[in-house]
Image (cartoon, rainbow, N blue to C red):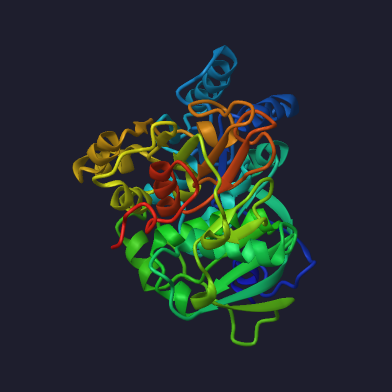
Amino acid sequence: MTITEKILASHAGLDHVEPGQLIETSIDIALGNDITAPLAIKAIKEIGASHLFDRNKIILVADHFIPNKDIPSAMQAKEMRDFARNHQITHFYEGVGIEHALLPEEGLVLPGDVVIGADSHTCTYGALGAFATGVGSTDLAAAMVTGKTWFRVPDSIKLIYYGHRDKWVFGKDLILYTIGDIGVDGALYRAMEFTGEVIEYLPMSDRFSMANMAIEAGAKNGIMAPDEIAKTYVSTKAKRSYEFFKSDHDARYIDIKEYDVGNIGPQVAFPYSPQNTRVISEVGNIPIDQVVIGSCTNGRLEDLRLAAKVLKGKKVHPYVRLIIIPATQGTYRCAMQEGLLDIFLEAGGIIGPPTCGPCLGGHMGVLAKGERAVATTNRNFAGRMGHPESEVYLANPAIAAASAILGRIGSPEEAGCKE
């Protein structure tokens, strides 16, 4: 079996599962946020359930419209807060971080887990060797009451990355290139299993970025077999036991693709699709109005360090807004202690609190008609970050920072960063 099949089998109490098989599994984590949890809460009330399956395994994170931008968003957060209080839910968080950065940081999701979340980017946790996937709010409600959910076991695609990365190529570029190759439906309801020598040496921050955007290829989940790097990451954070799974050498894959990363340069995804990718050298002259560095894809400390490396001693273009959003309060504190925030402020950047805000066109970075933004986020559909006639270009933090300096989409070398 593949790693995905093994994890699902273990949680279904079965010795073996096959792709296409319908199974019911226990879950380790059920996650909701300030947009999706209120809908789940409504469904729980409608079915008349008075008890939840385990208050320690339900996690509620207010992060999308935090700090609240208006009365409706404040009411959503309050409904979730009251529900957490009434059911004595152990893990309720408000304003302390973006869910998919916060949960790994807090040691709440671990290798071998089955995690469901009413948010499509729940697949982020596959970077730790967990089966993690997004569900609808009604499925979340049922799981919060029963502790179980159902799946159709997905086929798996094996993605092998080998060779030597360019110094400005990161996990974000690898996943953008892959999506550009297979398309936004290239892994529809399949498990994307990331393997190869390049993955073995990738830092956790890059792994999280890759697993995070598996959904942008239509995948059911993205996953990597946990190794020493993952073990080092979770060993100081884990608050319960965990298990490492890996695919058998004779596991069956519906497709296998190989990528020589030496042929992959820094990527930019053009509007209006993550698959509309170009290498930075082929972008051309595209003036921009805004840069956002943050989100559950690229708002971790390593991402901020990379942006600071490019921005140090430079100034943001006078007609560009640079918005920096650390993904969690812990990341914010570390960035402050390391002097990264000073670099951003000296460059002319704006530093915001942990929030999903601009990524979904919610607040703290909404685009006007005709404006263009470079963002380290994960989606660039029409109207994603504001006006339907605005444009979002996806890139890694180094490209984003360089673009803020140049006033157009460009590389770190063009912005004067040679390191």
- Residue 330 occupies quadrant: top left
Which residue is at a point 65% across and 70% down the rendered structure image?
5
The percent position of residue 200, horizontal first and vertical second, equals 43, 75
The percent position of residue 39, horizontal first and vertical second, equals 67, 28
Which residue is at a point 67% across and 57% down the rendered structure image?
275
Nearer to me, 369 or 231: 369
Nearer to me, 149 or 385: 385
The percent position of residue 174, horizontal first and vertical second, equals 53, 65
Q: Is residue 71 visible from the viewing direction of this image?
A: yes
Q: Is residue 113 visible from the viewing direction of this image?
A: no
Nearer to me, 32 or 277: 277
Asked if 138 appears above or below 253 in the picture, the reply is above
Which residue is at a point 48% across and 62% down the rendered structure image?
171
Asked if 83 appears above or below 173 in the picture, the reply is above
* Residue sitting farthest toward the top: 71
* Residue sitting farthest toward the bottom: 250
Question: Number of numbered discs present?
Answer: 0
User: Where the C terminus falls, by quadrant?
Assistant: bottom left
The percent position of residue 341, horizontal first and vertical second, equals 26, 38
Asked if 64 appears above or below 10 in the picture, the reply is above
* Residue sitting farthest toward the front: 285
User: Where the N terminus falls, by quadrant?
Assistant: bottom right
Horizontal arrangement in the rendering, residue 162 relative to residue 370 (left or right): left
Horizontal arrangement in the rendering, residue 3 relative to residue 139 (left or right): left
